[in-house]
């Protein structure tokens, strides 16, 4: 019988914080911008420049720590990590090694076997590096320092995950917590959330961990899942052949679905860390910590409980609505206006989701205002427009955030409740479709559906369907 292997996975997740300015200078952190325009002597490593810590970075890092059940290091400091790379103008990175701001936390994920805690070893603050641009020129690489000094937190998990599903669940949980906190938008594609995967395999039941490798360059959940599968197979193959797994950093190429070695994995001592001499220690007083705690917004778990209690919507609805902060915000704001939580929830879960899929949008891209959705719900509830017109108007709200009251007025979309007008249209439909009338009288109930359809068509979709049915049956 062949051996059974267990995969052991730990994650290092880098998250760009949503501060307006960089961690040690007042340059903008905005994404894009012409190369090297968001720079100054500090973030380009000029001699004589001195870093000044951005207070907001500490507050965001602590907020993420509190939300992930960490202990906050109230007396913490920065360390200098020394290495040369062209995107790193100082030849060192200011990071934290000895006293990271958060330690010993966890998040809980859902697995087929029930809830599981994934330990968080630490969270530390550091500065991002610049970016090398290789593609556009054949004979050189250029460097853009706009990203140099953008604040990051690195969230280091314990090796508690065992497969790609757990890794994705953990990342989704982290992303949701951080988005709810407003500490980052966590977009993998734009690089504001980046995950490095540490993976080893061991024989089932073994106590000792195998040798791990680290995989970088993973910018989608799909790439992460592929990389985990590919690396697990590669390591098992080596072990089966009696060859050692080498501790190294590997780059995953999702197009080729394979990885190659980048460099041997260095240890902390290789970087000659020492306490950063240009920055004073950070003292997070009890008062400051209490202020950060008091500012923590309601997170998903708390929202789920409150939605059930306050709005009496089904669990299923609450799960979907809270799956993105933006959706939850729209739900709450719209409900506050129209006081019809279940109706708001229906619009979000059905039409909003459908249109998001059709237009390949994320919840964060939603632009329509709660005011307009609330107005639409009122129009539909009052019977001013029928349900198919409501869907049509919603699509306009979704795409252009139009005012539904005006739109319905201007386009003459109000439901026709005028019995006289309906009656004469229906009489004409009956006269024009003798076959369907005969079918109906011969017991084909379905024939009436056709006649309703013809009437709605003649009324340009604006008839009151209840009235159409009633008058039709009467006349037939
Ligand atoms: Zn700067």
Image: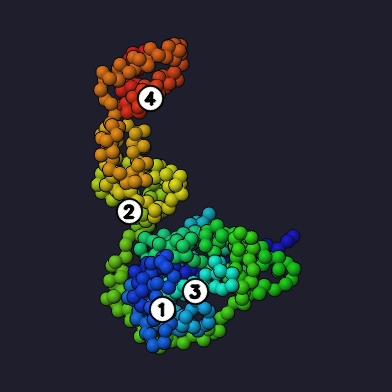
Q: Nearer the viewer, mark 2 or mark 1?
A: 1
382 to 81, vertically: above or below: above
137 to 375, vertically: above or below: below
Rendered residue at 47%/65% (across/down): 191
Q: Earlier in the sequence, mark 4 or mark 2?
A: 2
Rendered residue at 32%/26% (across/down): 463
Whether ligand 1 has any atom under 8 Å from the Cβ at mark 1 is answered as yes
Q: Which residue is mark 3?
A: 143
Could you tell me how far apart the alpha carbons at marks 2 and 1 are, in whole angstroms? 36 Å
SS class, disc 4 = helix
- Residue 406: image x %, image y %? 25, 39
Q: Counting other residues with Cα less than 10 Å from the Cα at mark 1, is it few (<14), some (14-19), or many (20 or more)? A: many
Q: Earlier in the sequence, mark 2 or mark 1?
A: 1
Q: Which residue is mark 1?
A: 43
Could you tell me how far apart the alpha carbons at marks 1 and 3 are, in whole angstroms? 13 Å
- Residue 146: image x %, image y %? 42, 72
- Residue 307: image x %, image y %? 33, 51
Could you tell me how far apart the alpha carbons at marks 4 and 2 are, in whole angstroms? 38 Å
Q: Which residue is mark 2?
A: 329
SS class, disc 3 = strand
Q: Nearer the viewer, residue 461 or 32?
A: 32
Q: Earlier in the sequence, mark 2 or mark 3?
A: 3
Whether ligand 1 has any atom under 8 Å from the Cβ at mark 2 is answered as no
Could you tell me how far apart the alpha carbons at marks 4 and 1 are, in whole angstroms? 65 Å
Q: Which residue is mark 4?
A: 457
């Amino acid at each position: 019988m062949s051996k059974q292997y267990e995969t052991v996975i730990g994650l290092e997740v880098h998250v760009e914080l949503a501060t307006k300015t960089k961690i040690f200078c007042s340059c903008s952190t905005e994404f894009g911008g012409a190369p090297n325009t968001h720079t100054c002597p500090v973030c380009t490593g000029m001699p004589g420049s001195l870093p000044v810590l951005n207070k907001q970075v500490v507050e965001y890092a602590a907020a993420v720590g509190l939300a992930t059940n960490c202990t906050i290091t109230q007396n913490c400091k920065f360390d200098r990590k020394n290495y040369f790379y062209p995107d790193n103008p100082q030849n060192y990175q200011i990071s934290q090694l000895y006293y990271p701001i958060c330690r010993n936390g966890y998040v809980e994920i859902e697995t087929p076997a029930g809830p599981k805690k994934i330990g968080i070893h630490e969270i530390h603050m550091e500065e991002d590096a610049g970016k090398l641009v290789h593609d556009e020129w054949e004979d050189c690489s250029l460097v853009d320092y706009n990203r140099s000094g953008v604040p990051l937190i690195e969230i280091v998990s314990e090796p508690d995950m065992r497969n790609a599903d757990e890794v994705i669940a953990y990342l989704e949980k982290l992303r949701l917590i951080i988005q709810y906190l407003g500490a980052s938008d966590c977009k993998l594609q734009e690089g504001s959330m980046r995950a490095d995967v540490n993976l080893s395999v061991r024989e089932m039941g073994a106590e000792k961990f195998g040798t791990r490798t680290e995989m970088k360059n993973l910018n989608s959940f799909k790439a992460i899942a592929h990389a985990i599968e590919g690396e697990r197979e590669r390591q098992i193959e080596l072990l089966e052949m009696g060859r050692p797994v080498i501790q190294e950093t590997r780059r995953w190429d999702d197009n080729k679905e394979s990885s190659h070695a980048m460099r041997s994995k260095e240890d902390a001592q290789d970087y000659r860390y020492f306490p950063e001499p240009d920055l004073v220690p950070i003292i997070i007083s009890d008062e400051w910590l209490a202020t950060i705690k008091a500012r923590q917004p309601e997170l998903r778990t708390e929202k789920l409980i409150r939605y059930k209690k306050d709005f009496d919507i089904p669990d299923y609805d609450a799960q979907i609505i809270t799956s993105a902060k933006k959706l939850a915000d729209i739900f709450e704001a719209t409900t506050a206006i129209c006081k019809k939580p279940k109706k708001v929830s229906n619009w979000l879960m059905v039409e909003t989701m459908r249109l998001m899929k059709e237009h390949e949008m994320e919840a964060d891209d939603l632009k329509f205002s709660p005011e307009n959705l609330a107005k639409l719900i009122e129009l539909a509830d009052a019977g001013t427009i029928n349900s198919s017109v409501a869907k049509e108007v919603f699509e306009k709200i979704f795409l252009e955030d139009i005012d539904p009251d005006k739109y319905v007025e201007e386009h003459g979309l109000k439901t026709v409740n005028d019995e006289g007008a309906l009656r004469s249209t229906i009489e004409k439909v009956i006269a024009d479709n003798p076959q369907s009338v005969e079918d109906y009288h011969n017991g084909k109930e379905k024939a009436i559906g056709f006649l309703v359809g013809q009437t709605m068509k003649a009324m340009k979709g604006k008839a009151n369907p209840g009235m159409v049915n009633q008058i039709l049956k009467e006349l037939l």
